[in-house]
Amino acid sequence: MDKLAIADLIEEKYQVLFDWLNQQPAENWETGPEGKWTTSQHILHLVNSLQLLNNALSYPRFFLKYKFGLSNRPSRSYEEVVKKYQEKLEENKDKTIAFNENLKSPLLKDRPRLLTRLQIQYKKSQYKTRKISDVNLDTLVIPDPLMGKMTVKELIMWAAYHTEHHTTF
């Protein structure tokens, strides 16, 4: 998948999310199924994840290369990234629960601000995806707490799928 297709995929996944959010009653923002996250927690998690990715993509390329090295394999396809993510979630259920158990639950009054932040972050990720060179997409790596080291291309594709994953709650 090339970078323009990835940027389009990001747009598609976020449009589905925003369409879904616009259909949700206000009371769903602060309540969720028993033992599950609220809608606001899902959105906060997506904002935080995207902000971390965008911050990492803002570092100079030489710093990422020095800090994390270069990939020793070709980038995985979108389908392979999704499959690996689902496998890692299944293998690490306890770790993922512990990692996310202290996530705040934003109030309804925070909804407009949080949705604006989400929109800004996803637009930044599209811009950065279009701007980065194909060589850097496939050679630079960044670690993910669950997935381990991934190429920048894989991490951006994962971020698009991650949105879908949290839209289907």
Image: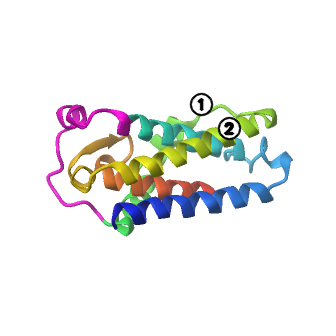
Q: Which residue is mark 2?
A: 114
Viewer-closest of 67 and 29: 67
> Secondary structure beneath disc 2?
helix
Q: Which residues are magenta?
A: 56-76
> Can residue 165 be spotted in the picture?
yes
Q: Residue furthest left?
A: 72
**Side of 8 where 27 appears, left or right:** right
Residue 94's x, y, as percent? 48, 43
> Secondary structure beneath disc 1?
loop
Q: Which residue is mark 1?
A: 102
Q: Is residue 93 above or below residue 55?
A: below
* Residue 41 among those drawn in magenta: no
Q: Is residue 118 above or below residue 24?
A: above
Q: Is residue 96 above or below residue 6?
A: above
C-alpha separation, residue under disc 2 versus residue under disc 1: 18 Å
Q: Residue at x 77, y 56 (%)?
A: 22
Residue 161's x, y, as percent? 48, 59
> Can residue 169 be spotted in the picture?
no
The type of residue carrying mark 1 is Asn
